[in-house]
Image (cartoon, rainbow, N blue to C red):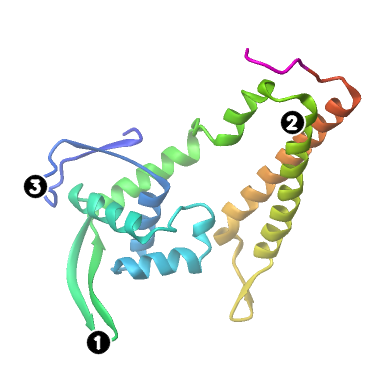
C-alpha cells in the first residue's frame, strides 16, 4: 500500500473506490483513537496536550472536523454514541475501525522507512534567492538564524518538560528530538552560507535566471 488508501470497507458504502491520501493530521487522529473512542474536541485537546501540534497542524478545528468526516467516509473510523453535557453542545464519539488500525500501522511503516520530498517553503525560497542581492540575502538569512536560535531553545525546554512532576518518557518526545537535530543542522548550514557571503566566496549578480 502506498501513501494513498483505496476505501473499500463496509463501513464506507458511499466511498467505494475513493482514494484517500495520508496526511500528518489523518495519522494523528487514527493514532490517538488507539487510546479509545473520543469526540473531536477531545482529539484536538489531546494533540495539544501531548505537544503533537508542533508537528501536526490542528490550529483550525474545522480542518479537524473535515478530516474526521473524510476518515469516516473512508471506513477508517466510525461514529458511535453522542455525548450530552449541559455545559457543551452534543458531541459525537468516534471509534477506530479494524481497517483504520491496519491502515495506521501501514502508514507508520511507510513514513518511518521511506524519505519523502514534502516540498517545504525554505528550499523553494532558496531556489530563487538570486533575485535578491547577496547583501539582502545575507540579512534575511541572519534573521532566520536568530529565529532558529530561539526555536532551538524552545525545543530544549520542551525536552525538559514534566507532567505531574515526572519527566516525559523519551519515546513521547522523539519528534521533538528530531526537530532539534534538524534546526541545529539548518543553523549550522546557514552559518556556513553567511560566512561565504561575508568573505565573497559566494556571490552573484541579482536578477532573473
Mark-to-mark CA distance, 3 and 2: 54 Å
What residue is rendered at 49% in x and 32% in y? 116
Mark 1 burial class by Cα count in 10 Å: few <14, some 14-19, many 20+: few
Q: Mark 1 highlights which residue?
A: 86
Determine whether label 1 and label 3 are within 8 Å by CB: no
Residue plotted at (76% across, 34% down): 189
- Which residue does the image show at 56% across and 35% down from the upper left? 121
Task: Kindly identify which residue carries mark 2.
Answer: 137
Mark closest to the chain's N terminus, 1 or 2: 1
Can the viewer see residue 139 in this picture?
Answer: yes
Label 3 sits on a secondary structure element that is loop
Closest to the camera, between mark 1 and mark 2, is: 2
- Tell me which secondary structure the magenta stretch mostly adopts: loop
Quadrant of the rendering where the N terminus is positioned: top left
Residue sitting nearer the eye, 84 or 182: 84
Quadrant location of the C terminus in the rendered image: top right
Q: Residue 208 location in percent, x, y?
A: 63, 14
Packing grade of label 3 (10 A; few <14, some 14-19, many >=20) is: few
Residue at position x 73%, y 37% in the image: 140
Q: Is label 1 in contact with label 2 (beta carbons under 8 Å)?
A: no
Which mark is in front, 3 or 2? 2
| Image quarter of residue 8 | top left
- Range shown magenta: 204-209
Which circle marks residue 13 in the picture?
Answer: 3
Query: Toward the viewer: 143 or 174?
Result: 143
Amino acid at each position: 500500500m502506498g501513501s494513498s488508501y483505496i476505501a473499500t470497507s463496509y463501513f464506507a458504502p458511499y466511498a467505494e473506490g475513493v482514494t484517500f491520501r495520508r496526511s500528518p493530521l489523518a495519522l494523528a487522529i487514527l493514532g490517538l483513537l488507539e487510546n479509545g473512542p473520543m469526540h473531536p474536541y477531545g482529539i484536538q485537546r489531546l494533540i495539544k496536550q501531548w505537544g503533537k501540534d508542533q508537528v501536526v497542524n490542528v490550529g483550525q478545528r474545522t480542518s479537524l472536523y473535515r478530516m474526521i468526516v473524510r476518515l469516516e467516509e473512508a471506513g477508517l473510523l466510525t461514529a458511535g454514541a453522542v455525548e450530552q453535557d449541559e455545559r457543551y453542545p452534543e458531541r459525537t464519539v468516534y471509534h477506530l475501525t479494524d481497517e483504520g488500525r491496519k491502515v495506521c500501522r501501514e502508514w507508520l511503516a511507510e513514513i518511518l522507512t521511506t524519505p519523502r520530498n514534502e516540498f517545504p517553503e525554505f528550499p523553494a525560497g532558496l531556489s530563487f534567492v538570486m533575485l535578491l542581492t547577496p547583501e539582502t540575502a545575507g540579512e534575511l538569512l541572519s534573521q532566520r538564524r536568530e529565529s532558529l536560535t530561539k526555536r532551538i531553545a524552545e525545543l530544549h525546554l520542551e525536552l525538559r518538560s514534566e507532567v505531574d512532576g515526572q519527566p516525559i518518557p523519551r519515546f513521547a518526545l522523539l519528534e521533538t528530538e528530531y526537530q532539534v537535530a534538524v534546526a541545529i543542522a539548518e543553523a549550522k548550514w546557514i552559518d556556513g552560507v553567511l560566512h561565504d557571503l561575508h568573505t565573497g566566496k559566494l556571490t552573484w549578480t541579482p536578477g532573473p535566471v
